[in-house]
Amino acid sequence: MKTRSLHHIPHKPAPRIGVHHHFGQRVPDSRGTEGALGLQQAQQALHEQQWHLATEHCESVLQTATSNKVLTQTWLTLARALWHQGELVGSFQAALQCQEAAQRGADVASAISAATLAAFALAELDWTEPALELARRALDLAQRPSQFKLLPTALSCAAHVNARRADLEASEHLHMRALSFARESGDVQAMQLAYDNLMLSFSMIIRTAQAASQARLTEAVSARARNYAPQIRSLLEHPQLDEWRRISLMHQLGEMLCLCGDLDEAEPLLQNSLKQALNLDASYSSLTTQTALAELYHRKGEPDQALTWLRDSLALSDVAASGYQRHLRALCLAETCYRSVGQTSSADALALRASAARAGHEAMRTQLAARSAWPLRV
């Protein structure tokens, strides 16, 4: 089963995207309202990870529905379905439509969900400043007493966007608030999400720091990440932790330790994460962990072994559905490994694929700038 999201879908393996948080809201009881049945079908398809079917149902509802409540939820469902398909421009625009409908209906919860999803889409396309504006808007709304259930979502979103901007202090502060919220709730699953998101943000920041040769920032992130490792290892042993959550947390900790240079600690975590992901048939989780293992073996100076772990990634042609950042990392890593073992023609071919992936990402950025009413700033 392939998954792609920043959200948590109850009872299903962890989906893909940058940050994980609570995914879905139940449709308000709108039986008898025009379009309600189509909306229920769309949300059921979304829950079952039938992204294209969910999109079709949403588009049908939008042609006939008149209820603002139904329209709000349909736009939100469409935004999520398009996100899963890598249609970031469409997802962003659907999220903005949801925001408008939510404001008309004074539906604060949907407005928060729409703003966070729009912020994630912008961040994925490297529009971090307007993404931060949206994330802050969602956070302001979520701090109302009536919306505290969505506060962890808004905190994680704002933390993620700040991580994209390599703002360690702001990102960690927001994650600490989310972690405190999870501890107060006593919910093991909420704790996993908070730690998962924290490690993911640290990984983003350290990658940025290493690419820019910022040794101080690299050391700062590494030191802070290592401080959380004992707590995360303890949580991994908790008997009430869902298996797919354990897989995700093992992967995030393992990847972070790899980036810190703690390869011997990282390897068993990544190996165990992969083994359990394969048992659950969680294909996206398997791909991400294989890419992390390839990076680990590259850092160990074993390019042939690294290429073995990249075999599945290199066989994929759908960049959007397999995750742009992860896919590009796999292509660039494979190119480097092939060059190091003297296979120049294979390396050149991968360089072309990486260039095409970047061009596709840039095309989406250009498309969004041309079509969006949101004031994007270059």
Image (cartoon, rainbow, N blue to C red):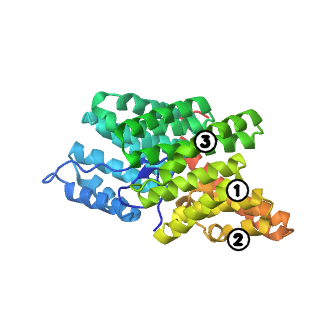
Residue at 41% in and 56% down: 239
**The N terminus sits in image quarter:** bottom left
Name which of mark 3 and mark 1 comes first in the sequence: 3
Q: Secondary structure at mark 3?
A: helix
Position in image of residue 312 (x %, y %): 62, 70
77 or 228: which is nearer to us? 228
Position in image of residue 324 (x %, y %): 59, 55
Mark carried by residue 202: 3
Q: Amino acid at mark 2?
A: Thr
Q: Secondary structure at mark 2?
A: helix
Of marks 1 and 2, the one in the foreground: 1
Q: Secondary structure at mark 1?
A: helix
Q: Amino acid at mark 1?
A: Asp
The correct choice, above or below, for 280 with respect to 63 in the image is below
230 or 75: which is nearer to us? 230
Query: Which residue is disc 2 drawn over?
Result: 308
Residue 182, quarter of picture: top left
Q: Is residue 372 visible?
A: no
Graded by Cα atoms within 10 Å as few (under 14), some (14 to 19) or many (20 or more), the crowding at tag 1 reads few
- Give left or right: position of 227 versus 216: left
Residue 48, quarter of picture: bottom left
Q: Amino acid at mark 3?
A: Phe
Mark carried by residue 264: 1
Residue at 17% in and 53% down: 34
Of marks 3 and 1, the one in the foreground: 1
Q: CA distance from mark 2 to mark 3?
A: 27 Å
Q: CA distance from mark 1 to mark 2?
A: 19 Å
The correct choice, above or below, for 371 with respect to 169 in the image is below
Q: CA distance from mark 3 to mark 1?
A: 19 Å
Position in image of residue 361 (x %, y %): 61, 52
